[in-house]
Image (cartoon, rainbow, N blue to C red):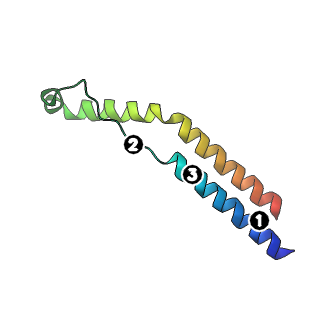
Amino acid sequence: MAREKKNQSNQFLVNYVTKLQRLNDIEPETPRDISIDEIIADPTAFALAFVESEFAKHIPSFIEAFRLGQDLAKNNLAAK
């Protein structure tokens, strides 16, 4: 009985990590509409705008990862 629960918990973790790996496959896209001169003129502003843009694009992935973590915790608690 205890071994079955451990195996079930291990399977929950394996499923969670597999789904999380898929969500973490994030490839930032370099902006093509800005010149190097604009970047050199204000690199901080460029970096902030770039990070905000990339973060906003991937918010659904972050939310899904959070939900998956909640599901993992619920499944592990239910298995105990």
Residue, x 61% and y 45% (percent of image)? 66
Q: Is residue 1 above or below residue 58?
A: below
Q: Secondary structure at mark 3?
A: helix
Q: Position of residue 22 (x, y in %)?
A: 54, 49
Q: CA distance from mark 3 to mark 2?
A: 15 Å
The amino acid beneath tag 3 is Leu
Classify mark 1: residues with Cα within 10 Å, few (<14), some (14-19) or many (20+): some
The residue identified by callout 3 is 20
Dot 2 corresponds to which residue?
Answer: 27
Q: Helix, strand, or loop for circle 2?
A: loop
Q: Is label 1 in a helix, a strand or a loop?
A: helix
- Which quadrant, please, contains the C terminus? bottom right
Q: Earlier in the sequence, mark 3 or mark 2?
A: 3
Per the image, the residue denoted by label 1 is: 8
Distance (Cα) linking label 2 and label 1: 33 Å
The spot of residue 38 in percent (x, y) is 16, 26
Using residue 44 as the reference point, say whether residue 37 is left or right of it.
Answer: left
